[in-house]
Image (tube, grey):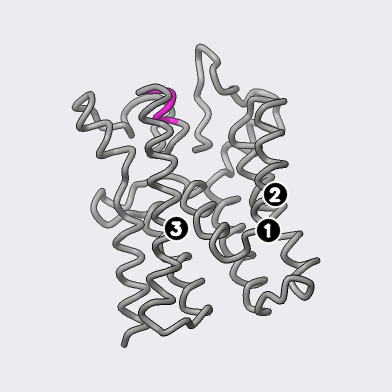
Amino acid sequence: MTAFLAILFSYLLGSISFSYVIAKKLRQVDIRQHGSGNAGATNTLRVLGVGPAITVLLLDCGKGVAAVYLGLWFTDGNSLIAATSGLAAIAGHNWPIYYGFRGGKGVATTIGVLATLIFYVALIAGIVAILSIVITRYVSLGSIIFMVGSTILTIFFWDFFNYPTYYIYFILVITLFSLWRHRSNIVRLVKGNESKIGAKKNTEKGG
């Protein structure tokens, strides 16, 4: 019962769309109707500017961190439930019950989850992802690199870092989540017409 509650609360927490809330407070607009239409930090940057975008990024990451700790707290340290709670928060961000199941792509929330569960792997993958964004200005590419990189590193180093075996399956699931949510971005990247961050006409949906 406690495990179920941890997962449920994590989903409900993940369903809070900070980009939606902040856009409503600052501009009285539905952020999903502006910019790329994505309820995430990148589109917040596009529509509202740097300050709100950083706020959304930190709060969305915080949802992931909090969900993992909810799972640990409700079950006296059960890392499987903690990981599942993190997954539930990501699902909540992507398909939020409060907003008609239309949310973001879960990148920032995923960063929070992975940074809590597999810190060193997430750190390495995150550095590579940030460098790719700086060099290419493709946020979607950086998001994909972070997820795929985290997956590969977890598979190769799970024994070295003494991660539970089920972490591999867990990260494979959230990577598939991310790739599915970024499928249109992948198509545009392959075709060479994905918009870059800061471009005047930006239709990118990677954030």
- Numbered label attached to residue 197: none
Marks 2 and 3, how far apart at CA: 17 Å
Q: Earlier in the sequence, mark 1 or mark 2?
A: 1
Magenta region, residue range: 43-47
Pointer 2 local density, CA inside 10 Å: few below 14, some 14–19, many at least 20: many
Q: Earlier in the sequence, mark 3 or mark 1?
A: 3
- Numbered label attached to residue 64: 3
Q: Residue at x 47, y 74 (%)?
A: 82
Q: Secondary structure beneath disc 1?
A: helix
Q: Judge by depth and name the residue closer to the eye, 52 or 95.
A: 52
- The residue pinned by badge 2 equals 125
Name the image quarter holding residue 191: top right
Name the image quarter holding residue 75: bottom left
Marks 1 and 2, how far apart at CA: 9 Å
Amino acid type, callout 2: Ala
- The answer to whether residue 198 is above or below residue 175 is above
- The residue pinned by badge 1 equals 120
Q: Nearer the viewer, mark 1 or mark 2?
A: 1
Amino acid type, callout 3: Gly
Amino acid type, callout 1: Tyr
Q: Secondary structure beneath disc 3?
A: helix
Name the image quarter holding residue 30: top left
Pointer 3 local density, CA inside 10 Å: few below 14, some 14–19, many at least 20: many
Q: Residue 177: x and y, percent?
A: 54, 57
Q: Residue 140: x and y, percent?
A: 59, 36
Q: Earlier in the sequence, mark 2 or mark 3?
A: 3
